[in-house]
Image (cartoon, coloured by chain):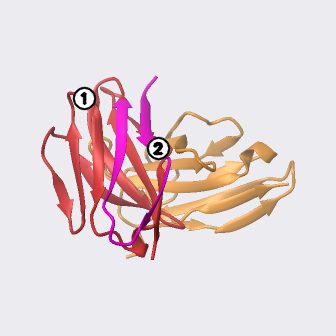
Amino acid sequence: EDKVVQSPLSLVVHEGDTVTLNCSYEVTNFRSLLWYKQEKKAPTFLFMLTSSGIEKKSGRLSSILDKKELFSILNITATQTGDSAVYLCAVWSGGSNYKLTFGKGTLLTVNP
Amino acid sequence: NAGVTQTPKFRILKIGQSMTLQCTQDMNHNYMYWYRQDPGMGLKLIYYSVGAGITDKGEVPNGYNVSRSTTEDFPLRLELAAPSQTSVYFCASSYSQGGGEKLFFGSGTQLSVL
């Protein structure tokens, strides 16, 4: 069975801190890994990673994939209260029938 | 740009009642999905569709039905609501499903079955 495990499950930091969120996976025939940010409602797309060792960056957020060790990290520098959200990791796997498996998410709370 | 639109946003049902959650997308996406999200859990796939007239079960299909008569619409039907169906439901769509597609999500429906 495909598994995606995120850690920590929750995290509380102060504004300005840097955080690292982890996502490890065990899937058959890995295709890509996605990060989403979920505030009160719909998950919104952050990054998609397919190649190992190539960092994706958007402002204060960055992410990298390690296909050998089967994990990804999401870094957020200089955190702001607006970064408070659940961060979801999901992995596409499979051959002819693709499957997207989600982790349980990391709840990040940024206090002023 | 509307994207993926879900209605209603909130609903309370009594045990045994039926209802349809509506989902429509205006991005001309072929693939559409229904997920449920329980507190502290990841999203679980209920049903998905690869195009008009074609639907298939996901991980947790029991107690639900879907139809896909047009590219734009993908309603989810609960026939006999049970407390175990209390959850937040998300509809999503993607252009294809080649293992490298991002999903676009609707804003969710909070459903309580009492």
Residue A69: mark: 1
Q: CA distance from mark 2 to mark 1?
A: 33 Å
Q: Residues within 10 Å of mark 2 (few under 14, many from 20)?
A: many
Residue A46, quarter of picture: bottom left
Whether residue A87 can be seen here:
yes
Query: Where does the N terminus of chain B fall, quadrant-wise?
Result: bottom left
In the rendered image, the residue lying farthest to the left is A54
Give coordinates of residue B72: x percent, y percent: 46, 60
Instruction: Give the amino acid at mark 2.
Output: Ser
Residue B80 shows up from this direction: no
Is residue A55 depicted above or below A109 in this figure? above
Callout 2: residue from which chain? Answer: B
* Residue drawn at 34 percent across, 37 percent down: A92
Q: Secondary structure at mark 2?
A: strand
Subunit under mark 1: A
Q: Which residues are magenta?
A: A1-25
- Magenta stretch, main secondary structure class: strand
Chain drawn orange in the picture: B
Which label sits on residue B16? none
What residue is shown at x 46% (from left), y 41% (from top)?
Answer: A103
Three-letter amino acid code at the position of disc 1:
Glu
Using the image as rendered, state which of residue B39 and residue A15 is in the foreground. Answer: A15
Is A13 one of the magenta-colored residues?
A: yes
Q: Is residue A17 left or right of residue A38?
A: left
Residue A83, given in percent of the width and then of the height, sits at 40, 68
Q: How many marks?
A: 2
Label 1 packing within 10 angstroms: few (<14), some (14-19), many (20+): few
| Spot occupied by residue B86 in the image (x, y as percentages of width and height) | 73, 51
Colour red belongs to chain: A
The residue that mark 2 highlights is B49
**Residue at (43%, 27%) from the top-left corner?**
A2
* Residue A50 at x, y percent in the picture: 20, 41
